[in-house]
C-alpha cells in the first residue's frame, strides 16, 4: 500500500475562491511507496507549499482524498519531520539543544523528558555526527555557517525518527558547493533509514539527483503535468 496517497485532490483557500473556481491545486493524484523519495518541481506559485500543507494535514482538501500511512488525514500529522529554506534554529540554543527541541514539544511531561534525556541526547549526537557536525554540539547558530545550520535543521527534522521527511526548498539559500555536499549527506541518511521523503524544489537537477520519482507541476492551474521515475545515475542498495 502507498504511504502517501493523493487522489484527485483540489484545494481552494477560501469559499469565495472556490465559488470563483480558483483552486491553488487541481486534481493532484500521486502515490509514494513506503521509503520512496519523491520530488515535486515547478515554478513558484504552482502549489508546492499547498501540496505540503495537504500532506501534513495543515489544510484539508476542498475535493478529493489524502491518505498517509493508510489513514485519511484529518488534522496535523505528528509522524513527519520538516525542514525549510531558512534553517530557523533558535539563536539562544546550542546546536544540540536545537536538534532536541521537537522532543520537548511532543513530550510535554517534563519528568518523562528528563528520564529519557540521555537516550534522546545520544540520538541527537549521533545524527549530528552523521552530518559532519560532531564537535559543534555546544556552538550557537551564529557560530555556524549557513550550510552547517541547514544540516542541523535536517537533524532536528529527523530526531523523532519520523516516517516521513518533508523538505521545502531546504537547499535554496546555499551556494552550489554546499548544496551538493548536503545532497550527498541527505542521500546517505535516507539510504540508511529509509523514511519517506517529499522534497519540494524549483531545481530540476536537484530533484533528479535525489529522488526516485519526480513530479512536475505547472502554474495556474496548479497541476501535476509530468511524472518520471529516475532509473539512472545512482544505483542504490
Ligand atoms: P508554491 O509553493 O509553488 O510557490 P503555493 O502553494 O504557495 O505555491 O501557492 C499556490 C497558489 O495558491 C498561488 O496562486 C498562491 O497565490 C495561492 N495561495 C497560497 N497560499 C494562499 C493563501 N493562504 N490564501 C490564498 N491563496 C494562497
Ligand atoms: P557555507 O554554508 O558558508 O558555504 P559550509 O557549511 O560549506 O559553508 O562550511 C564549510 C566548512 O567551513 C565547514 O565544513 C567547516 O569545516 C568550516 N566552517 C564554516 N563555518 C565555521 C565555523 N563557524 N566554525 C568552524 N568551522 C566553520
Image: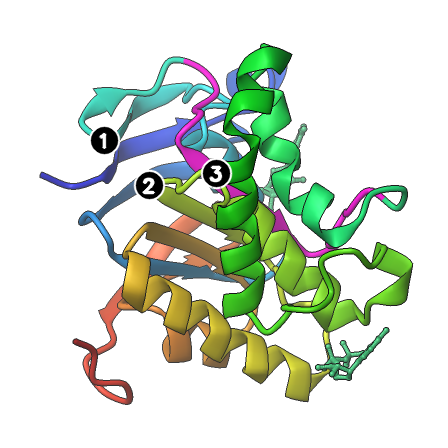
Element type at mark 2: loop
> Bounds of the magenta span?
75-90
Residue 205 lies, with reference to residue 64, above or below; the image says below
In this rendering, position of residue 65 left or right of residue 89: left
**Residue at mark 1:** 69
What is the tally of numbered marks visible in this picture?
A: 3
Q: Is residue 180 visible?
A: yes
Quadrant, the N terminus: top left
Q: What crowding class fits label 1: few (fewer than 14 Cα within 10 Å), some (14-19), or many (20 or more)?
A: some
Which x, y percent locates residue 77?
Answer: 43, 24
* Residue at image point 78% right, 56% down: 138
Image mark for residue 119: 3
**Residue at mark 2:** 163
Using the image as rendered, state which of residue 84 and residue 134 is in the foreground: 134
Q: What crowding class fits label 2: few (fewer than 14 Cα within 10 Å), some (14-19), or many (20 or more)?
A: some
Question: Colour scheme of this structure image?
Answer: rainbow
Q: CA distance from mark 3 to mark 2?
A: 19 Å
Residue 79 lies in magenta, yes or no? yes
* Residue at image point 46% right, 37% down: 160
Instruction: Nearest to the eye among marks 3 and 1: give it.
Output: 3
Amino acid at each position: 500500500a502507498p504511504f502517501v496517497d493523493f487522489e484527485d485532490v483540489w484545494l481552494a483557500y477560501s469559499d469565495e475562491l472556490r465559488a470563483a473556481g480558483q483552486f491553488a491545486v487541481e486534481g493532484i493524484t500521486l502515490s509514494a511507496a513506503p521509503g520512496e523519495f519523491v520530488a515535486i518541481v515547478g515554478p513558484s506559485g504552482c502549489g508546492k507549499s499547498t501540496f505540503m500543507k495537504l500532506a501534513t494535514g495543515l489544510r484539508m482538501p476542498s475535493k478529493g482524498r489524502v491518505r498517509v500511512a493508510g489513514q485519511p488525514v484529518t488534522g496535523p500529522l505528528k509522524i513527519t519531520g520538516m525542514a525549510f529554506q531558512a534553517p530557523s534554529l533558535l539563536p539562544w540554543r546550542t546546536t544540540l539543544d536545537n536538534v532536541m527541541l521537537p522532543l520537548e514539544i511532543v513530550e510535554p511531561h517534563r519528568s518523562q523528558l528528563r528520564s529519557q534525556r540521555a537516550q534522546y541526547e545520544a540520538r541527537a549526537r549521533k545524527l549530528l555526527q552523521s552530518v559532519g557536525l560532531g564537535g559543534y554540539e555546544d556552538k550557537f547558530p551564529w557560530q555556524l555557517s549557513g550550510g552547517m545550520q541547514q544540516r542541523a535543521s535536517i537533524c532536528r527534522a529527523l530526531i523523532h525518527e519520523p516516517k516521513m521527511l518533508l523538505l521545502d526548498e531546504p537547499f535554496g539559500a546555499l551556494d552550489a558547493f554546499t548544496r551538493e555536499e548536503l545532497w550527498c549527506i541527505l542521500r546517505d541518511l535516507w539510504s540508511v533509514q529509509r523514511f519517506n521523503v517529499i522534497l519540494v524544489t524549483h531545481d530540476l537537477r536537484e530533484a533528479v539527483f535525489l529522488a526516485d520519482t519526480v513530479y512536475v507541476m505547472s502554474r495556474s492551474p496548479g497541476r501535476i503535468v509530468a511524472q518520471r521515475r529516475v532509473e539512472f545515475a545512482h544505483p542504490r542498495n
